[in-house]
Structures are given as structure tokens and as C-alpha cells.
Amino acid sequence: MADKMDLLEVEVWDGNMAASQAFRQVQIDVVAAYPITPSTPVVENYAGFLADGYVDGEYVMVESEHAAMSGCVGASAAGGRVATATSSQGFALMTEVLYQASGMRLPIVLEVVNRALAAPLNVNGDHSDMYLGRDSGWIQLDTFSPQEAYDLTLMAFKIGEDHNVRLPVMVHQDGFICSHTAQGVKTIDDDVAYNFVGEFQPFNAMLDFEKPASYGVQTEEDWHFEHKARQHNDLMTKVFPQIQSVFDGFEKLTGRKYRIVEEYDMEDADVAIVAMGTSVESVRIIANELREKGVKAGVVGIRVLRPFPLTELAKVFSGVKAIATLDRSSPNGTVGMLFNEISGVLINTNDNPIMNNYIYGLGGRDLTMDHIRSIYDDLIVNAEAGALQQPLQQFIGLRGPKLSFY
Amino acid sequence: MSEIKKIKNLKEFSTSADRFEGANLLCPGCAHSIIVREVLNATNDDLVISASTGCLEVCTAVYPYTSWDASWIHIGFENSSTAVAGAEAMYKALKRKGRLMQPERTPKFVAFGGDGATYDIGFQWLSGCFERGHDMMYVTLDNEVYANTGGQRSSATPIGSSTTTTPAGRVSYGEKKNKKDMLAIMAAHGSPYVAQVAPNKWKDMIKKIQTGFQTEGPVFINAMSACTTEWKFAPEDTIDISDLATDSLVFPLYEIIDGKEWNITYRPKNIIPVRDYLGAQGRFKHLFKKENEYLIEEWQKRIDSNWEYLQRREESRV
């Protein structure tokens, strides 16, 4: 039996510690993990909890990230609560098994501390790994601060393990800017947190010997499409109601409100920025500044990247005149992912906002307040002109000559 | 620890309840199914089984059917070892936490992989599992070739074998390198029990499988699996070819206990020439051309030398 840990009402945690504490509180049965910067402290902290008797599950320190996710799949199919953490190259290495996990409908939780992908090698935060995972059939939740990393990691288990859902969940946080930045985090008592998530309820467990199950079978042209379609259908129809229900329950428990689309001052917004990760909080600061000057500025933070809340976003953007999408991943030959996704949101609506795309912050490059001001300046010009007055895609914060496309 | 299943004779053994069904898509004459049945029938305990991508996997779990009346998982080509290790970790966790559904059961954890999955692509995963000491048995279905994808070489393919990626041709005699010594490699991992088995020597094989099941920690079994399709012999000759392999000492049967104690478990009364083993298979046909005859002599010398080495290891107890 694991010991309880006495927590202060507010602890000073970085994003990694916040995630580790959530892992501890839900009493995971098996963690199979391999360390990689910047998510390493998640599994180091967890190892410390184990060494001090605060967790009593199995902790398997495997020899690679591919093996980490392979072990997680075997453990999850056996029938228990499973989680791990990774970043960047480690995420890329486990990609093969990410598809296996979702295809087998295993509710594994993966803390992804976002980091750039080589080459050139870079240990700092951008969203390249998050983008790499977006077709893998996982639920992807994005967090903007250590508090949110804590809250959403707890909620991830309750979302994915629900028997209507049975899908793995990634919880994203920005490398270093969130993972290594200590802030005040409001905590939940161990028992309260555990009871909120609840005891793991097995489904088709390999360790149920009265009802043996075959996992990871083969389907060819006769059945493969039906299986993939069913998985997509469940992602589209089962996940949002469960997320909403978990968000509601969490608000009742803690007073902290989460929304599928994190809109900020969007009711009457003329200009809006769409972003992910820690940048959302920075953009909100500048939006406040502009509001004081009389500019109707709003912010949209992507809380749930997969499944993508297309319909909800369309409502949020209704009436907006100019929108900037901020992508923290090299688009490598096209527009940024968020530009594409938000274009898809708006294409069949009566709204016809002017849209542009900013590529920023690759490899941990800072996004400054001035950068954000300049983006809003562009939006104001576009909104007034009713047409795009700059190139569609601009790189910001880049050294050397200004780079833009389309 | 559960009781060892008592197996009196072949008839009783062959008619014991099947957890691996005859309804599968393996080639007629494939030794895989014989080996798998012998492994599964060696115990009455519950089983959690994994299979790597390969012949066994693609032929036994094609939706909506399964040949497995036991818990079974396949993830990928490289990770059947880690799949079962993950399940074993979950068993330990739930046992400790008192949440096992059937706490009275004593399941065994078994991973199957072909030689491609074991010697090549899954080697890192296997090594990791054995270093960590999971309580599991890993069984290689060693047919010395990537049979599932049409007969490409693996690092278990022996010298002179013609495969689709090392074909014998006008200027080539086929595979140029000799087989990796996986048993010694796995013994060097500190495995408490490593053994080579062949399905034709079923008593020897059952004894080793049961020893493996009674051994705590990671057990490695290399099972010779004669492949009618890629070795090129008639489907009804599987056991005869297997007899040639064990009696020529190309596949010597032995075990390694705690990495130190080497025991030869089968000594053929009449050791037959390696030439007879090679000559019975199409994959070595070209070796009997005049210009390649020297390779058969080299084969014999190598097998003699390996046998000599095995006997010395057995005597020396180091």
C-alpha cells in the first residue's frame, strides 16, 4: 500500500513535477519509461516517489522509447492503469507503437513534454513532436501552464479509461517554458484526486483467464477499413461528451474551469490569435493591453487538438474579421497546421475572415510581447482593409532578412 | 509454484486439450505449429502469449478468427518480448495491490518470435527484457530465414543457404556468413536457463520447456523449426528433416544453466554426415555442384568443431 503525501494547498512545481504528482496520485499500475530531455524529470520524480514508498506499482526502466510504449501496450492489454512520458526523438521512436496502442483501444496516458525534432539537434521546446502525433488515433490535450499540466494529466486518465472511450491520451506541455518553470500549483488531496479519477476498470484484460482475448490481430481489405472507421467514429462521437463531463466534474471539485475551446474575450472580437501551449497565456496579456486601448482583441487556445473541435471553433470565430494562426513547428513546405485546420473550420460558414499564418519559436526561440503586438497590428490592418495586407505566411523572431511566403 | 504437468506418452501428450487450435493458416508441414503445441501443452497453467510479426502471427489471428484459446497479443515485428514483459509487470503490480481477477491462478508469460524477430530486428528489446530479468520465456521459432516475407536472409541463415536476398548464382554460393550464436549471447545476459530444442525430440523438448516454466526469470529457448517452403523439402518430411538436423549435430540439443553449466541433452547413437542433412534440402542444392563441394567439407569441419566445443564446455563447468 502506497503512503499518502501531505501536500500544501499551493505547491511550487514546474510542469514536470506537476505531471509526476498527477501520475503518483492516480496510482498507476505500470509505468514503462525511458528518459529524454525535457521530460526526464517526470520519470525521475516518479522513481523518487517509488523509492520513498509513495507509489506501489511496477516501474519498468526499459532500454528505449519504442520499448517504453511496447511495454505500456502489453501492460495495458493485461488490464491496468498505464502511463509514461517522453519528448521529441523519443516520441518519434515510439511512433510505430502509438498507432498500435490506439488501434488496440488501450487507454494509456502519455505525457509529451514538447520539444523540437532534429536535425539539427535541439533540446528546447517547440511543437514538432505534438504535430507528429496528430494522426495517430490518440486524444491530444494541450496545456499552457504547470497548473494545467497537473489538472489535465489527472483528467486524462478519467477521459481515456472510460469504457465508452477506451482510447489513449497525450497530455502536452511546452518543453522548458512549462516543464522547467516553477509556478504556484493548487493541489488536490491524494484521496480526493484518486477518487475523482476512480479505480481502473479492466476491459477485455489479458489477465482475465476466464475470457482470453486476442490483441493486435490482422485485418486486410475485408475488415481493416471498418476497424479504422469505428475508431474514428468513437473519436468523433464519444470523446467530446466524456471530456465535457470530466471538465464539469473537475470544476465542481476544484472550481477550475476547462473548456474544449479555450476562448478568451471572443464574444465581440474583431481580431483574434489562435495558439497552443504557453504562448496562449502570453497572447492573452497583449489582448488585455489592446482591449484597454479599445481594440476588440480575442484569443483562442487549442485545448483539444484531437479530436479536433471543428464545430465549436466555428461558433467561437463567428463575426471575427481577421485571424492569425500561430504554429510552433516547421511546416516544411506548406502553411502551418493550425492555418489549415482553422481554414477548415471556417470554409463552410458565412464568415469570411482574413487569415494569416505565423511560424514562430522553433527550437525554443522566444516569442516576445513585441512579436505578439506586431501580429495584432497586422490583424488590425487586415480587418480594416477587408483583405490580406501582408504575405500569408510570415516567420517571426527569425534572425536575418524577413522570411515570408504565399 | 504450480505443479509440473505429467506427460506419460506421446499419445496422451498429443491428445491433451489444445489451446492452440489446428485451425490456422500455417503451411502444411510447418514445424511452427508442432513447436507451439508442444510449448503450450507442457503446462496446465494459464498463459499470456505474445507473438512477433511473422508466420506464426499472420497465420493464427486473422480477424474475425483466432487460433489462440489463451490470452494473446501481437504488437510489432520487434517487440514480442517487451509486450509480454509489460503484461508480466502488470501481473506483478496487480498481485501486489490485490486486484488480480483470479488471484489463485499462476500464469506463465511466453513470447514467440521468428529468427528475424529474435536475432535481428528485436534483438535490442530481447536484450533489455533479459537484462531486467522479467519472469518470462522467450521461444525463437528458428527457421533460419525471413519466411513470412518470402525467404530473405536473416542473421540466423547459415553459410551457403540460397535465400531471395542472398541467392545462389553464377558467381555466388548464397549466404556468406555463418549464424549468430544466440544461445551463448542470451546465456551471457545472465539468463538462468537457455536451451536449444527440436520438435522431433519431443521428450527432450518438453523437459526443457517444463524446466523453463519452473525457472524464475527470463528463459530463452531456441527451437529449430524446419521450413518446408524455404528449406525446400516435401511437407510430409518435416520430422525426417528435423531428425537429420539433430542427428548430424547441425542443431545440437543442449542447455545452459545460469550461464555456466552446459549440458548436452541428446547424443545421437549414429552421427550422420552433414552432407546428408544438406542434401535433403533445396536451399543447399547448389552446394553439390563441383565448384562448391569444398563448402560441404567446411560445413562438416565446422559442425565437428562446434560439437567438440560443446563437449568441452560441458566438461569444464565454466
Image: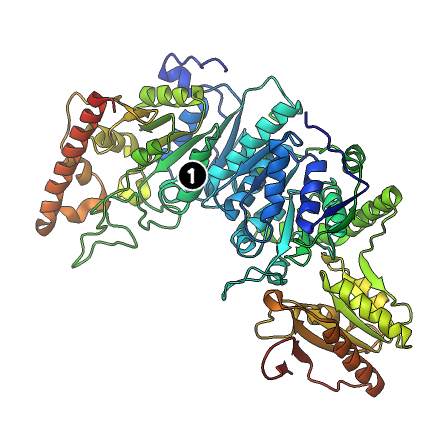
Question: Residue A126 at what x, y percent from top left?
Answer: 62, 63
> Taking A236 as reference, is B126 left or right?
left
Residue sitting at 33 percent across and 35 percent down?
B225
| Image quarter (top left, top right, bottom left or bottom right) of the C terminus of chain B | top left
Residue sitting at 78 percent across and 75 percent down?
A323
State the residue in front, B225 or A81.
A81
Does any portion of residue A223 appear in the rendered image? no
Q: Quadrant of residue A305?
A: bottom right
Q: Is residue A82 above or below residue B3?
A: below
Q: Is residue A210 above or below residue A252?
A: above
Question: Residue B212 at what x, y percent from top left?
Answer: 40, 23
Q: Secondary structure at mark 1?
A: helix
Q: Name the chain under label 1.
A: B
> Taking B294 as reference, is B235 left or right?
right
Residue sitting at 63 percent across and 48 percent down?
A102
Identify the residue position indicated by label 1 in the image: B126
Q: Quadrant of residue B102?
A: top right
State the residue in front, B267 or B11.
B267
State the residue in front, B48 or B98.
B98
Going by the numbered disc 1, the residue's amino acid type is Leu
- Asked which colour scheme the image uses, the reply is rainbow
> Taking A132 as reference, is A139 left or right?
right
Does any portion of residue A173 appear in the rendered image? yes
Residue sitting at 38 percent across and 16 percent down?
B11
How many marks on residues? 1
Question: Residue A240 at what x, y percent from top left?
Answer: 79, 52
Question: Residue B76 at what x, y percent from top left?
Answer: 49, 46
Q: Is residue A257 above or below residue B104?
A: below
Crowding at dot 1, Cα within 10 Å, few <14 / some 14-19 / many 20+, comes out as many
